Image (cartoon, rainbow, N blue to C red):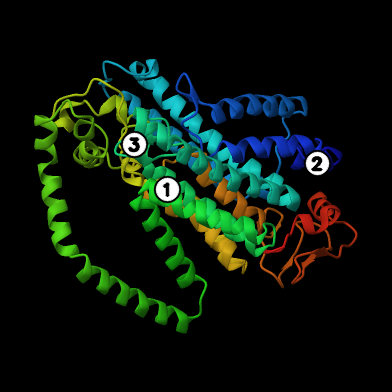
């Protein structure tokens, strides 16, 4: 048994024994297609197809190796915690199958089988969580692979912006809605401009990190700035502006001393006061509340208009009623399209005939999985930021770790892969030993034996003694790859 334990290598599941070219190809696909959920075949994203095929390959390798489960690195923490949250979401979703379904008349076939809807949605979520951990483990063990992946992610966002610009003449001349829709609003690889704007914010943060690490030249950085500025103007995403501001203010406040915090709070108060009076926030809020009260009437008398009968306006009435009816367990993960035609939630509104999504971010997710599961899921999303702050990571790494909780709070779907990839980028910069957080200048003792690993200010693991455990030996063998510095 001892020999078998020594042979367990957590890198096996992450593919560390495979050629480097395999890792680069996998990371290229994950990063290049993370911002293109619009690319689908039969309602299945191309990225999800790759994840399913590659995940099957990894599962076969795992079975061939005797079902050995890695107990070190990312797979211990936060991987173990994410596993418990996923189990909680699945059990809650199973409990929702007792409810009667009201599927739309037209739409994907699985909407007429509520149990299949839950399973498919949960599979999407599982793929995002697993490949977030998988990418973090690969990049944590190879800094060059991390730099390569971040560059692919950035230039994929740039390509989406350039293609959107190129589609603009076709939209104006022939009204072809390729990557431009509505009144000339860009959407890139997404269905709307808002989600695309959130994706562009994360790409800008990645570009800032690459520039700070001298991984991108000044002329290229100028090109990135100009392209991203034009893309934000075309997207017209208010959500992206709020996301960028929230990340910026949170980063400044969290990574500063108490004097800077007081100064930041004073500055934020001045800015908020100025915005309140300049934009007449009170009047805008009153109009918004009036529109909210009239939403049900608007949907009833304009049932054939997709802008009112579908999407956020109708969801603003339906979702709060779902939360009120099922605050603990929700209606089931991904069950909104199946349950939204329930007369209990519709009130005076008419049922819709086509597939519909709420688009309200965490609010709609609350209606699907319940309040307790949502809190647990959001804590898991925020864990890399806590980890970065606890270990004294660089300010930009902390900003990178804030991307997932903030973009999800603003409105990104939990089954979008790019927020999980942002957390993977952040985790790959953070120090680890025995799968736990390791602050610099801290000594980590092994589970057995008299040896110890001293994590120095440079983040390298040094020192051992007789009787060390396989975990300790593995950490020593990998050296700085296990307890990497916060900024190397």
CA gap, disc 1 to disc 2?
Answer: 47 Å
Provide the residue designation for mark 1.
Answer: 197
Disc 3 to disc 1: CB gap under 8 Å:
no
Q: Is residue 165 visible?
A: yes
As helix, strand or loop, the secondary structure at mark 1 comes to: helix
Mark 1 or mark 2, which has the lower sequence index? 2
Disc 3 crowd, CA 10 A, few/some/many (<14, 14-19, 20+): many
Provide the residue designation for mark 3.
Answer: 368
On the image, which quarter does residue 329 sit in? top left
Vertical side of 85 occupied by 383: above or below: below
Q: Residue furthest bottom?
A: 259
Residue 361 percent location from the top left of the image: 35, 44
Q: Say left or right for 425 vs 404.
A: right
The quadrant of the picture occupied by the N terminus is top right
As helix, strand or loop, the secondary structure at mark 3 comes to: helix
Mark 3 or mark 1, which has the lower sequence index? 1
């Amino acid at each position: 048994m001892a020999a078998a334990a020594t042979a367990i290598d957590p890198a096996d599941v992450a593919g560390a024994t495979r050629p480097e070219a395999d890792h680069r190809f996998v990371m290229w696909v994950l990063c290049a297609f993370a911002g293109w959920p619009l690319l689908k075949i039969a309602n299945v994203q191309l990225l999800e197809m790759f994840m399913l095929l590659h995940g099957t390959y990894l599962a076969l390798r795992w079975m061939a190796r005797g079902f050995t489960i890695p107990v070190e690195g990312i797979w211990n923490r936060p991987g173990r915690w994410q596993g418990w949250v996923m189990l909680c979401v699945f059990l809650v979703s199973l409990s929702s199958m007792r409810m009667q379904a009201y599927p739309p008349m037209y739409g994907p076939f699985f909407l007429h089988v509520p149990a299949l809807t839950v399973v498919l949605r949960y599979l999407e979520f599982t793929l995002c969580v697993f490949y977030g951990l998988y990418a973090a483990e690969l990049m944590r063990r190879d800094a060059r692979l991390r730099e390569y992946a971040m560059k692919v992610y950035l230039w994929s966002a740039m390509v989406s912006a350039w293609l959107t610009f190129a589609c603009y003449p076709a939209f104006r001349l022939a009204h072809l809605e390729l990557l431009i829709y509505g009144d000339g609003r860009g959407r890139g690889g997404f269905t709307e401009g808002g989600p695309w704007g959130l994706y562009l914010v994360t790409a800008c943060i990645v570009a800032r990190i690459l520039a700070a690490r001298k991984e991108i030249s000044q002329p290229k950085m100028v090109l990135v700035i100009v392209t991203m500025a034009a893309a934000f103007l075309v997207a017209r995403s208010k959500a992206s502006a709020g996301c960028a501001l929230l990340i910026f203010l949170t980063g400044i406040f969290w990574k500063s001393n108490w004097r800077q915090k007081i100064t930041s709070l004073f500055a934020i108060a001045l800015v908020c006061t100025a915005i309140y009076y300049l934009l007449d926030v009170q009047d805008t809020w009153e109009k918004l509340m009036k529109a909210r009260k009239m939403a049900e009437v608007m949907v009833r008398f304009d049932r054939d208009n997709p802008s009112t009968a579908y999407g956020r306006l109708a969801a603003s009435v339906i979702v709060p009623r779902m939360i009120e009816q099922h605050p603990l367990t929700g209606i089931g993960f991904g069950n909104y399209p199946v349950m939204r035609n329930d007369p209990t939630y519709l009130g005076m509104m008419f049922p819709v005939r086509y597939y519909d999504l709420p688009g309200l971010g965490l609010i709609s997710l609350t209606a699907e999985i319940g309040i307790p599961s949502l809190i647990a899921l959001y804590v898991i999303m925020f864990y890399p930021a806590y980890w970065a702050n606890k270990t004294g990571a660089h300010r930009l790494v902390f900003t990178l770790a804030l991307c997932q909780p903030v973009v999800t709070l603003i409105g990104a779907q939990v089954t979008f892969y790019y927020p999980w990839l942002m957390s993977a980028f952040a985790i790959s910069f953070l120090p680890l030993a025995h799968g736990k957080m390791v602050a610099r200048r801290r000594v980590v003792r092994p589970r057995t034996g008299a040896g110890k690993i001293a994590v120095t200010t440079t983040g390298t693991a040094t020192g051992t003694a007789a009787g060390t455990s396989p975990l300790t030996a593995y950490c020593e063998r990998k050296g700085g790859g296990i307890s990497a510095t916060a900024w190397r």
